[in-house]
Amino acid sequence: MSHPHRPRRLALTAAALLGAAALTSTTPATAGTGGATGTGGATGTGITQYSGTVPLGTTYTGTAYQLQDPTRGGQRTLDALNQTGNPGVPFTDADNTWGDGTPAHRQTAAADVHYATAVTWDFYKAAFNRNGVRGDGVGTTSRVHYGSGFGNAFWSDSCACVTYGDGTTPGRPPTSLDVVGHELAHGLTASTARLGYSGEPGALNEGTSDILATAGEFFAENKADPGDYLLGERVFDGPPRRMDRPSADGISRDYWSSDIAGLDPHAASGPARHFYYLLAEGSGPKVIDGVAYDSPTHDGSKLLGIGRDKATRIWYRALTLYMRSTTNYAGARTATLRAAADLYGPAAPETSRVAAAWTAVNVR
């Protein structure tokens, strides 16, 4: 990455329009399990704003519980105390029940983030056999309640950590499953392809985060926040970005064009998002888990999808083996074709559909 310490942000402002043992159950864990008789790992209960009541990996220190998960590389969620220079202090709790589902309770945002970060860890392990964001087995440190009225979230390469504000809309912090998954995917990209953050590499950087966030949200199977091809819809009244028709936000592009490198990376990521949706689900109108989609193609072609799991594995292999910091859209096409051939064979239907999906977003 050309600027290794620059924060990677979801751009969750309305003006900018802007992912093994999985945590797939929304059944509450027993509060305080494994903690009261000694120190060490425990399972707490998170009452979140966006994901319902969920289990949380915690640690009992001998006097209280903390949001530190020894089963996922020691991932931690800290309180930034509404400051911008504070590295964060541990949340502590006596009964291992965190939050009350409302943003007024200071632990609620922490519960959302701690849960979604654990989901992403489990997703990477199950889908890619990857141990953590950077593949080094070390859990991510997250900070919530950053600044005053800060409406964004960002990954920082310098500390390999993620920071979340309280939102510009009161009571709507950017801590939903897909927002957390998006930010963590920036860390994965930073430790693999190191895609730049401007021009077409920047578009692919942002597109990768939306792709892996979407796949992770489906993986979670969370009943309070089911998987979909929309980004940030729980934080705002409607999705700031979507995958099936990126241009619906009024800024993103559905298809590649020669001037796309001059756009903001979030808007320029449209063809990458659109490619992934078309590869996974195909074109045209359809309803998936109760959400209506209608994905067009540049060349008027009618596409059949290969399924989300295969599409995700192809993108991940392309990102981690064949993309580089300067990869552009044409390079991404080549990388994903190589990845599909590796996984399924050069003459396989999956490989030919990768080519067709890129053609459908005008990347030839």
Image: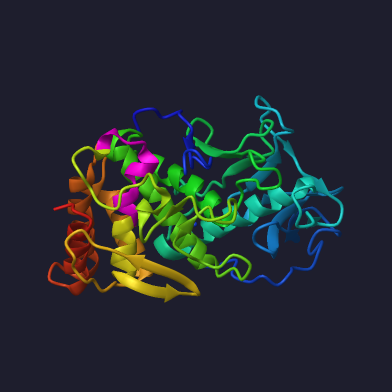
Tell me the quarter of the picture where residue 51 sits: bottom right
**Relative to 317, is 152 above or below?**
above
Residue 152 placement, left or right of 128: right
Residue 326 image position (x, y, % from top left):
25, 36
Residue 270 in sight in this render: yes
What residue sits 48% from the left and 32% below the top? 7
What residue sits 79% from the left and 47% below the top? 104
Residue 266 image position (x, y, % from top left):
39, 42
Q: Nearer the viewer, residue 99 or 321?
A: 99
Residue 324 placement, left or right of 219: left
Furthest-front residue in this view: 250
Q: Which residues are magenta?
A: 261-273
Residue 95 image position (x, y, % from top left):
86, 57
Residue 77 placement, left or right of 181: right
Q: Nearer the viewer, residue 91 or 305?
A: 305
Furthest-top residue in this view: 85
What residue sits 14% from the left and 67% below the top? 346
Magenta-colored stretch includes residue 272: yes
Tell me the quarter of the picture where residue 202 sits: top left
Magenta-colored stretch includes residue 223: no
What residue sits 84% from the left and 49% below the top? 62
**Relative to 294, is 80 above or below?**
above
